[in-house]
Image (cartoon, rainbow, N blue to C red):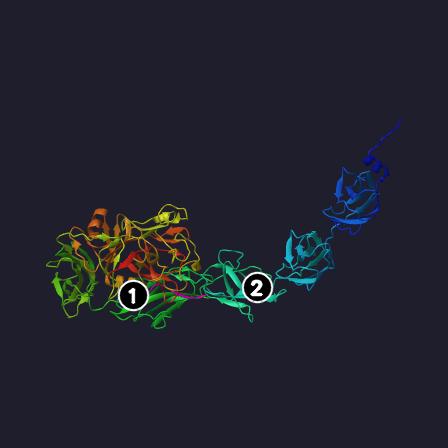
Amino acid sequence: MAFFACKKDIELLHETVPEIVTEECTDITESSAVLTCKLTNQGSASVEYGFYYSEAPNNTPTTVDKTISLSTQSNKSFRYTLTGLKENTTYYVRAYARNRVGEAQGKIVQFTTLSKKLPTMGSTSVTNVTTNSATLSGNIASAGTGTVKERGFCLSTTKTPTIADSCIFVGLGIGSFNYTLTELEDGITFYVRAYATSEVGTAYGETMSFTTASEQLPIVVTKSVTEITPWYATLNGELESEGTSSVTEMGFCYSATTQTPTLLDEYVKVNGSSFASVITTLSEGTTYYVRAYATNGKGTAYGDVVSFKTESLSKVSMVFLDKIDVNSAQVSFNLTSQGSSPVTEMGFYYGSTPFTMPTYGSAEHKYSIGHSTDCLVFNMTGLAEGTSYYVCAYATNSSGTVYGVTRSFTTKTSSLPSVSTVSVSNVSYSSAIVNGLVTSDVGINIAERGVCWNTTGNPTVSNSKKVSGSGIGSFSVSISGLNEGTTYYARAYATNGTKTAYVYGNVISFTTGRNETSSVEVVDGAIQAAFSVSDTKKVYFSQGNLQYQASSGTWRFAENQYDMIGNDNSNISSTYSGWIDLFGWGTSGYNGKSPYMTSTEEGDYGNGENDIAGTNYDWGVYNKISNGGNQTGLWRTLTSDEWSYLLNNAVIARAKVNGVNGMVLLPDNITLPSTVTFVSGMWAENKYTVEQWSALESAGAVFLPASGIRYGSYVTSFSHGYCWSSSLNGYADTPEYMFFTDGQAGSYYNERGYGCSVRLVRDID
């Protein structure tokens, strides 16, 4: 048998498979390695060669794994850089070579990629630790497998701080670095460690701890209060230790309401040389709480609370006069309050000339006794006949001396009769009846008696007069031909048959009515009738007392002049929806004090020791009156001098309107209605119904109701009237007010904690 073969087949019989060797991998990094092989025998044909590789656990890479094929060439050895590998991973590699005959594979070699390295941290230290600062030091020995893009310190009060906590950036790169922490809290343990961040991640140094030094507050002692008087006291303290830093301020805080006062209450600073201070703004008879304080960098420390009570002055009632005769008079008074210490002396001054405030040193005589709780009665003898005398009671304790109200009287004349002007009645627009009384003729016949009158005051028989017989007893004189709407002054007189001197009674004024009734209008709350309050100034009075509603913050004038709230003035609060008409000094709202405030502490009110005239502390200046024009600055409160001028020059009278006690003021020019009787004087007993008052009001008359007085939440004295002025009393530096009651009207002063009526006026341009 014969065999035949083609030339190609014959050639294959003589070709061989290549031979290749896999060498160890080199230049291994985190993501690459260099693969190397040698072609030891190419065989008899051109060769294609490369590598097979795989990750563990596939330890025998083949064509099914990853393949690196290189172009056919005849090099004896070749190298290839394998990239994109995983860090810290084991790989298996073997070389291959193939030709037409077949494929040869080298041995399997393995290698493991490197791991990425974080920066290497050096030592960390903390030095220069104080109460609020510390110096941190760190070091980065190497950058690892990346570059240090950020370095610094992480800080916390926990034991292993990280960059998630408070992180302090201190630049970049390797080497040493420092940072000084400030504004740390004292007495706190902190943990700190250095950090370095590269592309690989963040590396931390060792954790260090340090504790800031504890800062100490000052130590102060509140000592006993000395030199206590009704209005001032000396506060004493001692600084035992400044603490761990210098004291920047020290002094005393005090309060009459808070038993543990702080710097949120009243306080006074002292200098470093003397830890004492005299407080001069205290209230009489009031308990205060005080404690020393001192402030350093740590804060404010307080001493123990010490309490003290200011002394109280004694109080005496006004003098009452009786049994006034030619050469004698009887005076009586009593001690209404002893004060905080026993009264050592009491009595009264008297003399024929007015006294000089405040010492009464110009009084000609002084009657003095020791302490007594009874009503004291004293008969003054040896007085000059027909002479005016002035009398004032006083009482003294260790806190000082207080004085009562000065009263005056005139002794009788021994050789002349005693005459009284009793009353004026049946006043019309052209006539009136004046009633008189001759009570004693001292043994001498009364040759003539009667009434004299004029329009200027203090009439005598040289003016108009009308005789009404002779002798003692009551008599009446009807005078006519008077001008309508005119104020007249009248008084009874008498004379005996042996002397030409005349004796006059007291002066009574009255105002004739007018034939045709005309009505005075009320415009924007102002009664359009002029009242002189000085030689050059006139005002309109408001239509009623000032009232306030706390729930709405609204001010208004009372609808009627005789309106008064009464006991409901005690029901006040920020939500009270009723109206109130009594107010403490200076509570207009401008000074942040509520108009319904009822504090009994003088220091809570007003504009300090200053008048409020023309300031925002005046109710009328600061507030809009809803039925009074509803603008600020339209109204104001009369000063003390203006009240005094008004009471001394206007026609005034005691009256009761619609059952309410009060005082009537007549304007400068008035024509009284003929249908209404008006008797002037504070002893008068004018009583008017609503209809009668309406007729008098239409002529311009003003009525001040006796609304009483409020102290705290206690309301009383509805038979008395009290109206604030905008002035301080020059003697006592306390607010002055106008008052009226049975038989008298005048001005006095009291603590700011008392609530009185407010009647506003508007200036007439």
* Residue 696, above or below 638: above
Which residue corresponds to the image point at 70% horizontal and 59% vertical from the top-left? 210
Tell me where the magenta segment starts and ends, as one range.
399-406
Horizontal side of 669 relative to 208 (left or right) equals left
State the residue in front, 601 or 103. 103
Write down the residue under mark 2. 294
**How many C-alpha atoms fall within 10 Å of the one at disc 2: few (<14), some, or many (≥20)?**
many
Q: Quadrant of the N terminus?
A: top right
741 left or right of 307? Answer: left
Residue 404, magenta (yes or no):
yes
Residue visible at 35% across and 59% down in the picture: 618
Whichever of callouts 1 and 2 sits on the residue coming sooner in the sequence is 2
Splitting the image into 4 quarters, where does residue 678 fall? bottom left
Nearest to the observer: residue 406 or residue 305: 305
Residue 215's spot in the image, x, y percent?
A: 64, 62
SS category of the residue bearing label 2: strand
Q: Quadrant of the C terminus?
A: bottom left
Q: Residues within 10 Å of mark 1 (few under 14, many from 20)?
A: some
Please determine whether, in this image, residue 60 is positioned above or below residue 120: above
| Residue for badge 1 | 408
Q: Do the residues bearing badges 1 and 2 touch, measured as CB atoms within 8 Å?
A: no
Left or right: residue 242 compared with residue 683: right
Q: Is residue 389 visible?
A: yes
678 or 420: nearer the viewer: 678
